[in-house]
Amino acid sequence: MSSSSEVEILLATYNGDRFLREQIDSILMQDYADIRILARDDGSTDRTLEILSEYVARFPDRFRLLPSMPPTGGAKNNFLRLMEASTADRICFCDQDDVWSPDKVSRTKQEMDILASRWGIDVPLLVFTDLRVVDENLNILHGSLWAKMNIDPGCMANFARLLVQSVVTGCTAMINRRLLELSLRMPEQASMHDRWIGLLVSGMGKYSFVKTPTVLYRQHGRNVIGTGTAPQARSLLERFLHPRMAQKHFIQWKNSQEQAAAFLKLYAAELPPGKRDLIMAYLRCGTSKSRLIRIATLIRYGFYYPGILSNLLSVFNLWNVKLDKHGAG
């Protein structure tokens, strides 16, 4: 186990040689000194592994590289391998193509220390921040990802909302040891590691957030996950009627149902009764044979997305979802 002051940065890479040096350098130039980088590549075919090996050689006391084989096939499981190998009490997640503000770690650790002093180390703790959206040359496209994507970080206190909407961007997050240990149960049904830890904290932990953006969130043609784009249309009605919108929303909803079911199975004994009841209600939205019950359950418990369009699509999909003979969608 590392010292209590050490912060471990989990860096997951895959074919990221274009921007990787800039990201690593931004970590090494943090104004918080006690930082160690734990990296894992997932089978890159470019120069990513060569770059990582170079940093290991240059900074042997600050940089460790895990074996790459066998590849996991995705960022979520790559991060899971890193989490399994982590030994620190404070852990950050890092994407390969962003740039961190010099005070990112110190800002988030300050908030983490406040949480730990109030709630203790045995409670799952999370700190996350806003981001600036930039293009591939770091020109600012939007000063706040939260504003651009209509994200309210206060939704962390609303477990019903967290079942349908993720508000935590993993590359801004710092977690404590207890949250990492709980997160290691993450199953294939989890959409991403950051959404899983958000659910865990909303369900049984404590959190804080920093409104100041601490990451330049780079958007380019090879992002694994970005800010997303919606089909262009002139009106809300046209976007609602666009077939891609309904299909995309339905897939996201089905995935969130599968994730919620897996979450309940894994953590039922540790969740407060009220949180278990919310998950079971959310699952009824996908299993009740009655259209009216499905929609009434959504409204009663507030399983809402941000934005009118997304909630109209929820009602549309719950009205039209086809159930099999067991009642499942």
Image (cartoon, rainbow, N blue to C red):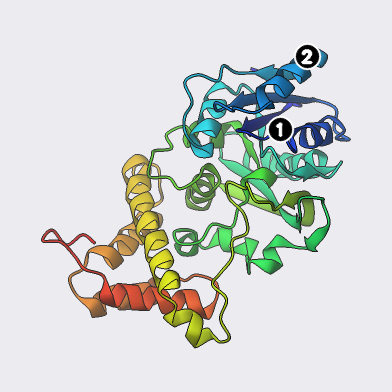
Amino acid type, callout 2: Asp
**Residue 171's disc number:** none
Identify the residue at image location x=23%, y=77%. Answer: 291
Q: Is residue 294 left or right of residue 168?
A: left
Q: Quadrant of residue 15?
A: top right
| Closer to the eye: label 1 or 2 | 1
Q: In which quarter of the image is the N terminus?
A: top right
| Residue at the extreme left of the image, as rendered | 325
Q: Nearer the viewer, residue 123 or 256?
A: 256
Q: Which of 241 and 158 is in front in this view?
A: 241
Q: Which of 272 and 282 is in front in this view?
A: 282
Is 216 located above or below residue 281 in the figure?
above
| Residue at the extreme front of the image, as rendered | 46
Residue that carries the numbered disc 1 in the rendered image: 17
Identify the residue at image location x=77%, y=17%. Answer: 54
Identify the residue at image location x=57%, y=76%. Answer: 232
Amino acid type, callout 1: Asp
Q: Which of 294 and 221 is in front in this view?
A: 221
Tell me how far mark 1 sits from mark 2, CA to CA.
23 Å
Q: Quadrant of residue 276?
A: bottom left
Q: In this view, does 87 lie to the left or right of 187?
A: right
Picture coordinates of residue 211, whole percent (x, y): 76, 58
Picture coordinates of residue 110, whole percent (x, y): 79, 42
Identify the residue at image location x=60%, y=24%. Answer: 86
Label 1 CA crowd tier, 10 Å (few <14, some 14–19, many 20+): many
Q: Quadrant of residue 149?
A: bottom right
User: In the structure shown, which secondary structural element does the residue marked by tag 2 occupy?
Assistant: loop
Which badge, 1 or 2, comes first in the chain's sequence? 1
Is 122 located above or below residue 254 in the figure?
above
Q: Is residue 16 left or right of residue 240?
A: right
Residue that carries the numbered disc 2 in the rendered image: 61
User: In the structure shown, which secondary structural element does the residue marked by tag 1 occupy?
Assistant: loop
